[in-house]
Amino acid sequence: MLCWGRGPAGPRPRPFLPGTAGGRSGGRPPAVPDGPVFLKTMEVLPMDDATPLSPAELRGFAVIAEACAEAFLNEPSAQIVDDVARVAQALGDGRFDGVVADEALRQRYSERFFVPTSPLYVPLSECSVRGAAEEGGRVRYAPASGAQADHVLKCYRAVGFDYRALAGFGPAVGSLHPDSLAAELAFMAFLARAASEAAGDDPAASERAAELLCQFAREHANAWLPKAARLLAAGDDDLYARAAALAADAVGSIAG
């Protein structure tokens, strides 16, 4: 299992924490890296490919994960939509073209994540989605607690990541679980930036952080994000279904 032992040494970036880039309390996410190196982040690597991700690829993944987490942590706004659209456009992906942050989208955000009786509601936590099953034409979600969430929390603690410090819309932040989609994406961005920033001064720490990132992606995020994206898309092809699909693509590219 991953996340046991010493965490990555060196600087520890804290995406979406109050007062930092990426959170609604502290400005925009980092600029999107340019060119083919960034695009390679989205390539699906062969299972036997042992080539480590470069610092630029790690930063590229972090930008994708941060932009998608931002969309789930905040009420929709023109800036939120622009942030995730810019990331997709850098990949030659126009899936967010035409999305408008209007009152209808704000209502959709509420229906998606805060109204359990809504037919569009999807509880975006690993335990709930991995344990979901269709019964009588409806999806019954598992409880938002369990072994997966417990292990995710141990992973966070092993490297000093506090998901409770994430910034965003109050009800969204207040309802976060360790295995919530936004929390897992922010954690992977945290590891990716740690690996990228340590690459020059401490290659061993960088390698360890990148290894934890890929293991977490395989054992946790990639085990449920594609299913979450499908469940969201079954309700409607909206901002949230598309953001989840983009996140699933990015995670799949590093999970192998």
Image (spheres, rainbow, N blue to C red):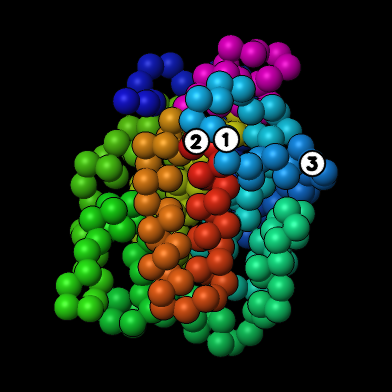
Residue with the mark numbered 2: 256
Q: Dot 1 surroundings within 10 Å: few (below 14), some, or many (20 or more)? A: some
The answer to whether residue 157 of the structure is visible from this angle is no
Quadrant housing residue 43: top right
Image depth: mark 3 or mark 1 in front = 1
Q: Amino acid at mark 2?
A: Gly
Quadrant housing residue 24: bottom right
Q: Residue furthest right?
A: 35
Q: Earlier in the sequence, mark 3 or mark 1?
A: 3
> Is the residue under label 2 in contact with that under label 1 (CB below 8 Å)?
yes
Q: Amino acid at mark 3?
A: Pro
Q: Main secondary structure of the magenta part?
A: helix
**Quick one: 178 or 128, which is closer to the camera?**
128
Element carrying mark 2: loop
Residue 133 location (% of width, % of height):
22, 64
Residue with the mark numbered 1: 45
Q: Dot 3 surroundings within 10 Å: few (below 14), some, or many (20 or more)? A: few
Q: Give the residues drawn in magenta, as a range.
A: 195-212
